[in-house]
Image (cartoon, helix red, strand yellow):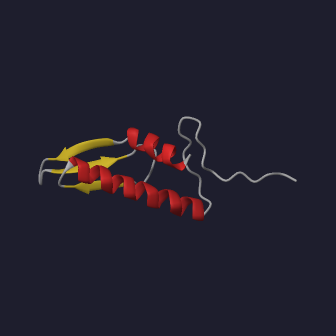
Amino acid sequence: MLTEYIHKAMDMARYEIIEDDHTYWGEIPGFKGVWGRAKTLEGCREELRETLEEWIVFRLKNQLELPEIDNINLNIVEQQA
C-alpha cells in the first residue's frame, strides 16, 4: 500500500525548468514542503521521491495527517473499544 501511495503521489508531481541555471524543479501539489531540484529531470524526480518518503515517515511518526490519494489512506485510525 505504501509503494502504491508513493507512485500515485509521484504521478501528481509537476516539474519545470529554472531558466537562470537550467536546473529542474519539482513539487507535488497538496504535499507542503515536498520538492526537489537537480540538474537533470531524472535527478529531480529521484530527489523528489526521496523527500516524499522522508516526509511520509516524519508525518506518520508524529501522527500528522497525510493526504488521501485515490482511496489510499495511510493515516492511523484509532479503533474504539
Pick the residue in front: 74 or 17.
74
Pick the residue in front: 16 or 79.
79
Tell me residue 80's x, y (percent): 84, 51
Tell me residue 60's x, y (percent): 58, 59
Q: Can you see residue 33?
A: no
User: Height in image: 9 above or below 59?
Assistant: above
The image quadrant of residue 61 is bottom right
> In the visual, does 59 lie left or right of 14?
right
The image quadrant of residue 15 is top left
Q: Can you see residue 76?
A: yes
Residue at image location 56% in from the left, 42% down from the top: 68
Count every numbered label the image shows and give the total: 0
Residue at image location 54% in from the left, 45% down from the top: 67
Return the residue found at the far top: 70
> In the visual, does 60 lie left or right of 8?
right
Tell me residue 59's x, y (percent): 55, 59
Residue at image location 60% in from the left, 49% down from the top: 74
Pick the residue in front: 19 or 7.
7
Tell me residue 4's x, y (percent): 50, 43
Return the residue found at the far right: 81
